[in-house]
Amino acid sequence: MKYNPSVIEKKWQEKWSELNSFKAEIDYNKPKYYVLEMFPYPSGAIHMGHVRNYTLGDLVARYKKAQGFNVLHPMGWDSFGLPAENAAIENKTHPSKWTNSNIQNMKIQLKQMGLSYDWGRELSTCDPDYYKFEQKMFLDFYKSGIAYKKETLVNWDPVENTVLANEQVVDGRGWRSGAEVEKKKMKGWFLKISDFADELLNEIDNLSGWPEKVKTMQRNWIGKSNGAIIKFSLDNSSEKISIFTTRPDTIFGATFIAISPQHPLAKKISDKDSKADDFIKFCEKNSTKEADLEKAEKYGYNTNLTVSHPFKKDVKLKVFIANFILMDYGTGAIFGCPAHDQRDYDFATKYSLDIIPVIKTKESLPFLGDGIHINSEFLNGLNTDDAIKSCIKKLNELGIGEEKITFRIRDWGVSRQRYWGCPIPIIFCDNCGEVPVPEDNLPITLPEDTSFDISGNPLDNHPTWKYTQCPKCNKNAIRETDTFDTFFESSWYFARFTDLNPSSAFTKDAIKYWMPVDQYIGGVEHAVMHLLYSRFFMRALKHVNTLDIEEPFNSLQTQGMVCHQTFKTKDEKWVFPNDIIKKGNEHFHSNTKEPVIAGRVEKMSKSKKNVVDPQQIIEEFGADTARFFMLSDSPPNRDMEWSDSGVEGSWRFLNKLWKFVISLPNKNNQNKLPTIISLQNKKLLSVMHSTIKDVTKAIEEFHFNIAVAQIRNLFNVVFSHKIENNDDVKVVLFVISRLLVLINPMVPHIAEELWYNLGNKDSISNESWPKVDLDYIKKSNVKIPIQVNGKVRAVVEVPINLNNKDIEEIALKEENVLKFLNKSPKKVIIIPNRVVNFVV
RNA sequence: GCGAGCGUGGCGGAAUGGUAGACGCACUGGACUUAAAAUCCAGAGUCCGAUAAGGACGUGGGGGUUCAAGUCCCCCCGCUCGUACCA
């Protein structure tokens, strides 16, 4: 019988489906475990990133099931978003049609991977039955003040008359039109994540199951800073400029003021000063991307206005409008202290402004460290901390400033001027203003007859959709034509999975039983935004009494990218790996036979053509091989390289395992060990028990590649085990059956089939995780390296826990040790059972 | 620019501060075969040495802490992710 994955994989997928093997139901007698992988955007077909993500999740789900947990493992579709709209424009297919056919296709592919999902809980965010609930959530947020409208800057394509996503801005130009992008002010809906900033920050400390790097990134993103507001009086005016600073102690080193081009004062100035207006317009010719803004050269415009120094009335500071000051941070204005800030220093040098050191230092300026203050009147002689306190006290006394905490995090703009998203349930009435849509009228669904030919927002362009009556006064009114950011949908889908109840978003019992998600798995690229928005959303829903959850994800694992070698022809054209023929170390194009240059290993991307289609791998080798390779090569949190030879290695291993099990004799009872166990059998059992221990540990620690290595190692030992009598057979059957249980979460189809071949009636998916017998692992001897000056000169095997004196004696009998130990050692370091080091 | 992470043989990667390179891939030799593939057995970081014993070197680069550093600290280089309207 040959290993034929296409037959057995289909067989077991059907069986699991028939038996409802992975259906999750509340069971108060069992501990629950909720495993979730980030749901995919239905782009058309699954790619290797999905295969990796879902293989990791499936391993956890199946492992936890074997551990006796009641496992919830659902899957759905993050189906609103920009690509559907682009497809509509390019291929003239309606977003809903395109999206749903993608979903169908991808669902078939996911099923072929043999993932243990409870498909009864499938959801799709573009379904009105899903998004109707978030319209209600938005109305609750609106009524409680969490949602509000404000003006913001967007990327505007003046040719297409449309708002561009940052992604659609390439080198400052619209991706389709090529027109220079402008910043445009536009009103949009925002959620007050800033009200929750402090709580979101503090609670990071309690996310013990999260990677430190993600927590650090979130802390930095929220960016709490303690500082002060200082009000500067504008000369010859009653106007004041409020600035925010984290270093009020350097106030005597202030030599200029800089305000954002979007600052209200900048606008006032530009009304009277056409050059200022030109400068502001110049600043607006940049994308809204932070990286672009920061990398752009720093410019300032001297407004010729001055302010007085708050503590030295005769000192005048020039007021600049500067392109690097963000209106969204602090107050949109700063004072510049060139001596102690790099950016201020660069700016002052460029515009020949004074540089006044106020902290004593021998180092060159700008000096960014702490120290004793000079040139600072009442702050002289103080260190930084004391000077900050002292300065704030004085500001308070004079009524010109105060202590202030600001956050870097900005409120979440949820408005998108697009069709393929959830409509925002607000109506604008000339009489009544903003009016929320009455809950009885939800959901507000998208019109199906939409044209994507005209530029701009299709909902706004639609001939009838936006026209309606005001729910309050019944007069003609207009609907909000913005739709939600798709992060809105992904901020609560995990809670919705606990119960797809048609009448309410959540049910109390299901939430209480299943939430929070015990293990969430997805790409690092979501480390901040999606994960932070989800944490915020839970709190916002709690605030409006919809849910009683704070932290949605108990434990988080982030996976690395799937990479592959790139290939280029001589004339710099990318070539698909599929079209490559390898001869020795050289590569050739399969059609043209021309030599091809092998490039770097990079993240799989369509543009570089270094993609391998999972579908093809599954067809050629089966899902188990694909899954096994995904797990075996790299630890989950690191990037991995997809290699053909690696896949073949996995394929070979599964074949070897198959042949070995199929050819075993006397497969009747795998649970009976012989009454007397021979030494060689004892050794095998010992390896098995330490493997169970190590595999369990590796899985718990998310080091799946180590788990794979341990299992392979156990198999190598069984494989070379001498089978000479019936006792040996019994032991090998005992070991191999447990090996199958260990490997089942990785390669469930072959594990099921071999389990069945061993004579088992029940599915291996219902089998519990093998237990470790520590008696088999106990060691009597231990190998200890003997070092001289930290270099290993011999290794001795001694009884475990042997006393230091005896170990030293044995060590000193080693010839090679004595060779390097020409005088008596200065010091002897003995770490019991570990190491002996003679220091000469 | 800023924030975060990563860097170990030819390659993917193992290593509670305690024998660096587990396991796998590629490779080499052997068995089987008319031959090849597949499979099985064995070898292997680099250099010196004899193919041995043994030694020197070796975890991106430079410095430091320690009896002992891939692991801890400082500086630098390279790559990757995020940077708020891609998901």
Image (cartoon, coloured by chain):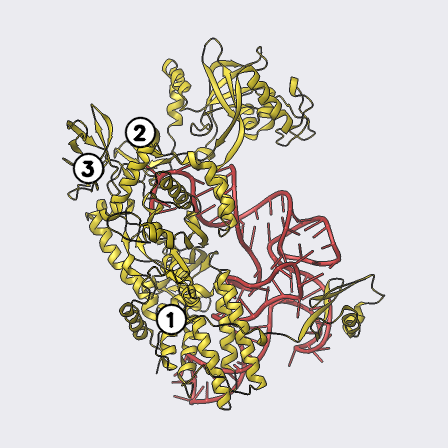
Chain colours: A yellow, B red
Instruction: Classify mark 1: residues with Cα within 10 Å, few (<14), some (14-19) or many (20+).
Output: few
Residue labelled with disc 3: A454
Q: Which residue appears at 61% of the width and 31% of the height?
A: A368
Q: Is residue A727 left or right of residue A266?
A: right
* Same subunit, tags 3 and 1: yes
* Residue toward you, A354 or A626: A626
Q: Is residue A811 left or right of residue A492?
A: right
* Residue toward you, B41 or A225: A225
Q: Which residue appears at 34% of the width and 33% of the height?
A: A144
Q: Is residue A584 above or below residue A526?
A: below
Q: Position of residue A656 (x, y in %)?
A: 43, 78
Q: Amino acid under label 1?
A: Asn
Q: CA distance from mark 2 to mark 3?
A: 20 Å
Q: Determine contact: label 3, label 1, CB under 8 Å.
A: no
Instruction: Classify mark 2: residues with Cα within 10 Å, few (<14), some (14-19) or many (20+).
Output: few
Dot placed on the residue nearer the N-terminal end, 3 or 1: 3
Residue labelled with disc 2: A186
Q: Amino acid under label 3?
A: Ile
Q: Amino acid under label 2?
A: Met
- Residue A766 sits in quarter: bottom left
Q: Tell me the subunit letter for badge 2.
A: A
Q: Tell me the subunit letter for badge 3.
A: A
* Residue toward you, A591 or A615: A615
Q: Tell me the subunit letter for badge 1.
A: A
Q: Secondary structure at mark 1?
A: helix
